[in-house]
Amino acid sequence: MKRFLRERQPFHHILMAIVAFLFMAPLLWMLSTAFKRPDDIINSMGTITWWPHPFTLENFKIDLTKAEEFPIWRWTGNSVFVSLAVTFLVVTVDALAAYAYSRLKWRGRDQVFAVLVATMLVPGQVLLIPSYLLIRELHWFDTYQALIVPAGAGAFGVFLLRQFFMTIPVELEEAARLDGCGPWGIFWHVILPLSKPALAALAIFTFMGAWNAFEGPLIFTDSMSMRTLPIGITIFQGRYSTEYGPMMGAAVLAAVPVLLAFLAFQKHIIKGISLTGMAGR
Amino acid sequence: MIATGCGDDRTSGHSVDPSGKIVLDFWNGFTGPDGKTMEAIVTQFEHDNPDIKVRMQIIPWGTYYDKLTLSLAYGGAPDVFIVHAARLPEFASFGKLHPVGDLLQSTSPPLTQGDFAPRPWNATFYKGVQYALPLDTHPGGLYYNTKLFKEAGIVDANGNAKPPTNLAEFIADSQKLTKDTDGDGRPDQWGFVYTNFRSNWITFATQFGADIVSADGKRCVIDSPESIQASQLMHDLIYKYKIAPRPDGIDSWLAFRQGKVAMAMEGIYMLDSLQEQTGLQFAGAPVPQFGPVPSTWAGSHLLAQPDGISPERSRAAWRLMRYISDHSLAWGAGGQVPARNAIRQSPEFHALTVQSQFAKELPYVHYEPLIPKDNSIFQFVDPAIEAVLLNLQSPQVAMSDAKRRVDQLLERP
Amino acid sequence: MSATIIAQAEQAKSTSAVVKRRRTTSPGLLFALPHLILFAVFLLAPTIFGFYISLHHWHVLAKTHPYVGMANYSAALTDDIFWLAVRNTFYFVILAVPAGNLVSLLLALGLNSLRRGQTVYKVMYYMPVIISIAVVAVLWRWLYNTEIGLLNVYLKGCVTGLRHIGLPLPPFQPVPWLSDPKFAMPSIALMSIWWGAGGNMILYLAGLGNIPDDYMEAAQIDGANAWQRFWAITWPLLRPTTLFCLVFSVLGSFQIFGQSYVLYAPGSGPARSALTMALYMYQQGFSEYEIGYGAAVGYLMFALVLVFTILQFRLFSQRDDIQPKARRAA
């Protein structure tokens, strides 16, 4: 019996399950609302009605077909495109830079790196107004460039990957050098292949950050066709009332890709983080 | 949208399309059914004016003024746009609007003051220059739940629900309509609920002769005895007479939709929100007169053009503006009260029950302060009103605090 | 024969070493350049330009932007609403960071000790993180509604039920989660903890995974119970993770914006109790269009964060390598 308890850990599971319910409850509510009619939503407020009555797909229909008012495909497409582009940009640029700060010696290297680290403390909002004016100067307002390119400026990824690169044994690099590899060769043939977990971790963090980015898209775009999903969803929140049904439907749609991405990559993320040395030795 | 920033013509890039038509950009915030109505009018305009193409962009009001302001400042401004009466002075004071006085004369028959309701007409002027064409007025009126009224026995000789017309009736009716139906010691049905604090407060305050700023727009007078009296009354309705719940933000409107509240004062634009709630029985009436002065909050939509628009495009834009005005009956059906006298006096308009009830208020509507800093003063006024209604501060304290800050703001260049 | 080869190899090594010294000065810069360009244009330049703006009276629609020196800064420092925003933000950080990290750590510990079914729970705890803040705020605004919100409905049910079975509780008064200034920030904090706990949980899981199993086994053999094992082994070895999580939690929390923006915005909450520094800055810049003043608020915010972070580092680096037992003795 004792071994059964230790193996199956029932109390443990019960506790975890209760906590899981607490975490999931608001989301289950979101899911339930997405399938309710507007009247039903209003009437069931103040009561605990989990099951939609009647069950309807009309919110999703509104979301997916009223393209001029809520171009949800466009928003989703924008979010997908921008998030992927940002991820690609950040991982590429930051890997190259991290290599420079960890494995190559050059004049001013450490001072420049110190500046980079310092800027990680600058609150993003401080940059909002000047970035906005800069984007206007460049005539990039309401364009994809405005959503993608500035995201490559952050130093977090450089910091993360540098930590990781420093854990790669120097001997491997030396061996490659003896084979005649220059810095690029070492980077491509040695560093990158060994860094897959860390790169994956950075990629998924960047993707999720870009997917849920709020203030940047809020300021740099304003036409319906350029909005990303998180901003687009706020349109359901009018000045005077909120259309909960279509909004929750849109929210469900918005959550699905990220959920799938997380399910696919969660083991890699954790492995990647632990290997960067940030999480202890 | 291609943003251009330079050049004399501040309007957007593609002004002529390949077939030689003039392309006008028209911006407004009419989401929902309002937008459909306007779209229909615009489509008809294009049909009747084959040399002009209109690109209408609907931007939800929450971000509308951001976009409009930024486009007027940095380029990409539309040729025709809607501006609320309360916001016109701000844009006019920075020189961002194109005067339209001459244009009113230019089409035939010319439009004059006599064609419009006085208040929206006057709101189009800033320092003696006319900058816009009035389209409509949307006053706050009384919505009331006819089923709850009948249940409480508040009916007229024909058995129809009878809304209150003054303070005494309002309190008496509300007390009958506030009930604790499930015996838990707290009312589940209320006589009244505050939905939009700002517009509700303006209605109450102006009925007592109070206002936010002085007539010359230079001083804040929100701490006047009349204002405090009105604010105290609003406070008492919740905490002394107990006929309204402590308000919980904009979702208070939901309580009316749910049929849990018998009365609410809101704008005509909330009409379709109610019409889509199946089973709700409601009607509209002018707001009760709580104080000595007949008055109610209102906003008005005006049509304007940006400063720097070329004469040719201005004339084309004017044709659109004029057309919309001429055809504003359809606009009235959508819910707004048209500013054109002829249209309001038509039998078709009278057939629209809630709208025509609300239209009775037109002679005494009261706008938000028509000053350039109108938008900015509310960052201090709104929290003061909220503090009173949530019982966080007494009216005296809240209003004198607001006065101090607003005066400071008005003094800054 | 082998000596020659060795000699040749040695020579090749030293040659390549010389070559290496000469060649790697420029490649380093080349590798760093793409990022540096983006950094300079989109991070450094705006930071400097922003400071320039803060020295002017700059309204978006105005035709001129006169230089006013530090006038915006002194206006902010004498603005009681600015200080209210500062206090609110600090309050949020104090409420959300320790509690949030504790929750994340507990979740990670719980997951770590499960033999089976880890993934299912992990995903469920992480789900809130993938939802956008706009949706989170709208959901919780609904949950928190005083009259008809789910939270109060459940609480009412619980209290009424407990009273029915005889417990001497007072009748239920709905909690004004969002409309009472005393509750506004705690409500935001609770919502934020719910939203973000999963994120730090992942980091703590990674940290826990790095603790070698043999340490734990050795301790078990020595007779240490779970509590002792935690304090003697887990907690100290988690320190890098904890430090990392705390620093970034604090950094992120100082910038809190989305919650108040979606839940409240305009005045920002009852008696402005939900007005944060970032929101105040945004409002001044993008609602009032006084971007000079808004920028000044932003830079004051930056200064505060900088000071606080430096203090944090000082605090943590002093406590390095102190054994728990030694601390108790001292």
Image: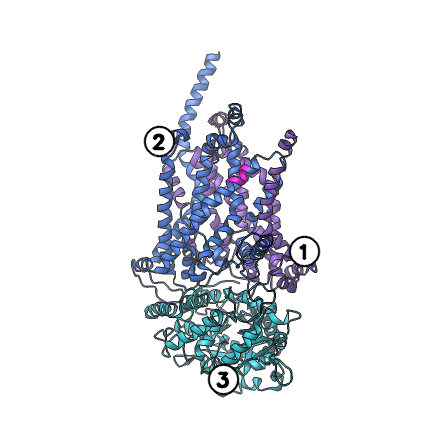
Chain colours: A purple, B cyan, C blue
Q: Nearer the viewer, residue C10 or A194?
A: A194
Question: Are labels 2 and 1 assigned to the same chain?
Answer: no
- Mark drawn on residue B363: 3
Q: Is residue C101 magenta?
A: no
Residue shown at 46% from the left, 30% from the top? C232
Q: What range is drawn magenta here? A: C105-109
Instruction: Point out the image quarter for the N terminus of chain A.
Output: top right
A229 in relation to C216, above or below = below
B397 in relation to C46, above or below = below
Contact? badges 3 and 2 (CB < 8 Å): no
Quadrant for residue C76, please give it. bottom left
Direction from residue A41 to residue B110 in the image, left or right: left
Measured as percent of width and height from the top left, residue A271 is found at: 55, 35
> Which chain letter matches label 1?
A
C308 in relation to C322, above or below = below
> Which chain letter matches label 2?
C
Q: Nearer the viewer, mark 1 or mark 3?
A: 1
Q: Is residue C108 magenta?
A: yes
Q: Which residue is mark 1?
A: A51
> What amino acid type should be assigned to the residue bearing mark 1?
Trp
Measured as percent of width and height from the top left, residue B138 is found at: 53, 76
- Rounded to the nearest angstrom, the CA distance separating label 2 from label 1 is 59 Å
Q: Which residue is mark 2?
A: C330
> What amino acid type should be assigned to the residue bearing mark 3?
Pro
Tell me if residue B17 can be seen.
no
Q: Which SS type dominates the magenta stretch?
A: helix
> Which chain letter matches label 3?
B
Contact? badges 1 and 3 (CB < 8 Å): no
Q: Nearer the viewer, mark 2 or mark 1?
A: 2
> What amino acid type should be assigned to the residue bearing mark 2?
Ala
